[in-house]
Image (tube, rainbow, N blue to C red):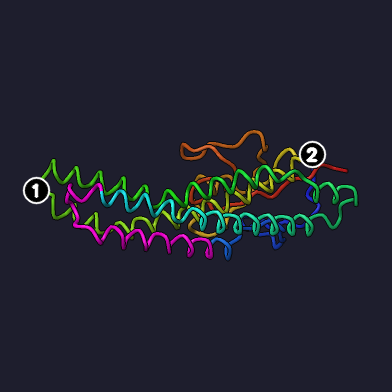
Amino acid sequence: MHRSPYRTRDRAAGRSQRSAFTRARKLEARYAAQLRRIARHVGEIVEAFPPGDPEALPRLDAALQRYAETIRPWAEAVGQRMVSEIAARDERAWMQASREMAAELRREIRTAPTGQAMREALAEQVKLITSLPTEAAERVHRLTLEGIENASRASEIAKEIMRSGEVTESRANLIARTEVGRVSTELTKARAKHIGSTGYIWRTAGDSDVRDSHRRMAGKFVAWDDPPTLDGLTGHAGALPNCRCYPEPVIPEE
């Protein structure tokens, strides 16, 4: 038998209740803006080289690899700030949700072992941020080879190469949305399992952009140890690519 010690909001059911656990939209927007700066620099580096020229590839690749290494300290700082802000936000949500809990349970929430989850999240952010220039290099290399193999598409491929900044910006936005949700879900899960929670209620953004597979999950109980598979991908609410959903922990009866 489980209960939620705080009021919840299920838009699909039309209830006007409120959850302490929601998407960190402002943090997501700020993180995306920071990553887009890297994407724009990647575009500038690519544009400095003649598109489709195989002789320029080694120099372009070296430039993007150097840039990836140059931004590593920055990536660590930005990633650390993002993870720390999510951790603080998650703790505030738990404190709001725990007002009706016993003092002992509130203490357990504060002392939950989130350190490992935070370290893993930071390492993943650094890896993803530094991959923006290296993946752009791989894309340019692939397109250049296509141009060599199919000369009739050379001008079309050159245009695609010059879109590298735009393509990298799109990936930066995807990383920001996915990672803010994923890290938030992982920290919520760590605290929830520490106090004996076995699962959560799946909540969606409640708008027309919600994917059908995610909309069908709205309001359903999901076990922490048994994430669902949706559209061929397995993961919890908020932890799937481009997912705006979030988990609302179900707290065991005291």
Magenta includes 44? yes
Rendered position, 128 above or below 235: below
Residue 196 disc label: 2
Q: Is residue 25 left or right of residue 39?
A: right
Residue at the extreme right: 103
Look at mark 1 in the image and give the residue it sits on. Answer: 152
Q: Tell me the kind of residue under disc 1.
A: Ser
Quarter of the image where the C terminus is located = top right
Q: Tell me the SS state at disc 1.
A: helix
Which portion, as a residue range, is magenta?
29-58
**Is residue 131 found left or right of 22 in the rendered image?**
left
Label 2 packing within 10 angstroms: few (<14), some (14-19), many (20+): few
Q: Which mark is residue 134?
A: none
Q: Earlier in the sequence, mark 1 or mark 2?
A: 1
Give the residue at x 27% y 52%: 60
Query: Observer-nearest residue: 247 or 110?
Result: 110
Residue 77: quarter of image: bottom right
Q: Is residue 200 above or below residue 206?
A: above
Q: CA distance from mark 1 to mark 2?
A: 63 Å
User: Is label 1 in contact with label 2 (beta carbons under 8 Å)?
Assistant: no
- Residue 210 x %, y %: 51, 54
* Residue occupying the point 73% across, 58% down: 93
Q: Farthest top residue?
A: 226
Q: Residue furthest left?
A: 152
* Badge 2 element: loop
Describe residue 220's horizontal placement relative to residue 37 as left or right. Answer: right
Q: Main secondary structure of the magenta part?
A: helix
